[in-house]
Image (cartoon, grey):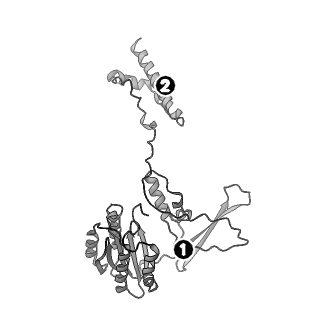
C-alpha cells in the first residue's frame, strides 16, 4: 500500500469518526470539513502527527465543539412574589385602565443577571410590564404638558380571526430640564455589613455615588449614614460643590458587622430632618444587599418607624445591590 493510498484511507477514517460523534443538528457542516484533502496532505507529509493513544477520542473541529454544560444555578435565598397575570377584560364593561407612571424595571435586570450567570430565573421573578418598560420606546417628550399618549396598532399575529387587532398605548411624561429641577437634599443610608464586602455590592454603591456626585451642583447636598451592628454618621449634610470632601467620605467606606437596618434608617431620617429644605427634593436613599438581621427586622415595623417622616415630605427610595437576600 503506497503512501498516497494510506493517507486517503486515514482521511476517510477521520471523516467517519467525526460523523459518528457529531451532533445531529449539524451533520452538513461537519461533512464539509474534509473537502480539501490536497491542502492537508502536504502538511501530514512534512510534520507527521504523533500517534494517538488507544483511549484518546478524536478532537472536535473548533467550530463544531459541543457547548459546555451550563453551570448549576448558584444557591441563593432570593425571594420573589408572584404578581400574577392580568386576565382578559372586555372593554364594553370595563373601559378604564389605571396604572402608575413610575413603573418599576428591576425584573428585566434580575432576569438578565440570572441568564448571564448560566441559569434560568425563578418564575415569580419575571414580570412582563417591567420588561416592557426597561426599554426606551423612543416617544417624544411633551414640551409643556405633564404627559402625552401615543397609540398604534396592527393585526394580531395570534390568529384569532381577521378582525382581531393589537393596540399599543404609550405614555411619555414630561422631562424636567436640569435648570428647572428642584434642589436635591439627599441622605444616603448605606449598608456596610459583612455581606456587602463584594465588588458588586459595596463597591458598586461607591461607584454609583461617584457618578451621582458628578451630576449634582451647588444647589444640592449629600449626607451619608452607614450601618453594620450599629448606625453612625459618616458625612454631615454637605454641599455638592465640595466634591472632594464627599468623594473622600465615599471612598473610606468599609464593610463591618451585621445588618441593623432599623438603626440606620432611624439615624438617616434624623439627619434628613435636620437638613430639610422647603420646596426641595428631600429624600432618604437606602442602599443594601438584603434583609435586616439585627434590631427590628420586620419590614412593616421598620416602615412604620419612618412613616411620620414621609408625612413631613421626606421620601424613601430603596436600592438593592447584588444577588442573594433579594
Classify the position of the N terminus by image quarter. Answer: top left
Name the secondary structure under disc 2: helix
Residue density around tag 1, few if under 14, some if 14–19, many if 20 or more, within 10 Å:
few
Alpha-carbon distance for marks 1 and 2? 62 Å
* SS for callout 1: loop
Residue 109 on image: x %, y % = 46, 61
Taking the spot 32% from the left edge, 22% from the top edge, the residue there is 46
> Residue 4 in the image: x percent, y percent?
41, 16
Does 259 appear above or below 25? below
Q: Which residue is mark 1?
A: 101
User: x and y percent of residue 247 in the render?
Assistant: 28, 72
Question: Where 209 falls versus 126 (above or below)?
Answer: below
Crowding around mark 2 (Cα neighbors within 10 Å: few <14, some 14 to 19, many 20+) is few
Would you say 153 lies left or right of 246 here?
Answer: right
Query: Which residue sits at x=48%, y=75%?
Result: 175
What is the quadrant of residue 236 in the picture? bottom left
- Residue at the image position 49 percent from the left and 53 percent from the top: 120
In the drawing, what numbered circle is on residue 4? none
Q: Nearer the viewer, residue 212 or 118?
A: 118
The C terminus - image quarter:
bottom left
In x, y percent, where is residue 81?
Answer: 52, 64
What residue does disc 2 label? 16
Of 54 and 162, nearer the camera is 54
Q: Residue furthest top?
A: 1
Query: Closest to the observer: 193 or 280?
Result: 193
- On the rendered structure, is 129 left or right of 278? right
Amino acid at each position: 500500500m503506497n503512501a498516497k493510498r494510506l493517507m486517503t484511507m486515514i482521511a476517510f477514517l477521520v471523516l467517519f469518526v467525526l460523523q459518528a460523534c457529531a451532533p445531529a443538528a449539524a451533520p452538513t457542516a461537519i461533512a464539509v470539513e474534509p473537502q480539501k484533502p490536497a491542502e492537508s496532505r502536504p502538511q501530514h507529509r512534512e510534520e507527521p502527527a504523533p500517534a494517538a493513544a488507544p483511549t484518546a477520542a478524536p478532537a472536535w473541529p473548533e467550530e463544531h465543539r459541543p457547548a459546555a454544560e451550563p453551570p448549576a444555578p448558584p444557591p441563593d435565598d432570593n425571594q420573589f412574589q408572584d404578581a400574577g397575570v392580568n386576565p382578559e377584560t372586555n372593554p364594553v364593561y370595563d373601559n378604564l385602565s389605571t396604572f402608575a407612571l413610575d413603573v418599576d424595571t428591576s425584573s428585566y435586570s434580575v432576569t438578565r443577571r440570572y441568564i448571564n450567570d448560566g441559569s434560568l430565573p425563578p418564575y415569580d421573578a419575571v414580570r412582563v410590564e417591567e420588561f416592557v418598560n426597561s426599554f426606551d420606546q423612543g416617544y417624544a417628550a411633551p414640551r409643556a404638558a405633564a404627559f402625552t399618549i401615543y397609540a398604534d396598532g396592527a393585526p394580531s399575529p395570534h390568529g384569532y380571526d381577521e378582525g382581531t387587532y393589537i393596540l399599543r398605548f404609550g405614555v411619555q411624561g414630561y422631562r424636567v430640564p436640569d435648570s428647572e429641577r428642584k434642589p436635591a437634599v439627599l441622605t444616603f443610608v448605606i449598608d456596610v455589613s459583612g455581606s456587602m464586602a463584594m465588588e458588586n455590592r459595596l463597591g458598586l454603591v461607591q461607584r454609583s455615588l461617584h457618578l451621582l456626585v458628578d451630576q449634582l451642583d451647588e444647589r444640592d447636598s449629600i449626607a451619608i449614614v452607614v450601618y453594620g451592628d450599629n448606625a453612625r454618621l459618616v458625612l454631615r449634610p454637605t454641599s455638592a460643590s465640595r466634591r472632594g470632601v464627599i468623594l473622600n467620605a465615599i471612598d473610606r467606606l468599609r464593610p463591618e458587622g451585621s445588618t441593623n437596618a432599623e438603626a440606620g434608617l432611624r439615624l438617616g431620617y434624623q439627619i434628613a430632618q435636620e437638613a430639610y429644605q422647603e420646596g426641595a427634593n428631600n429624600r432618604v436613599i437606602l442602599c443594601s444587599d438584603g434583609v435586616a438581621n439585627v434590631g427590628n427586622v420586620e419590614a412593616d415595623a421598620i416602615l412604620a418607624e419612618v412613616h411620620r417622616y414621609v408625612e413631613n415630605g421626606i421620601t424613601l427610595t430603596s436600592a438593592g445591590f447584588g444577588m442573594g437576600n433579594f
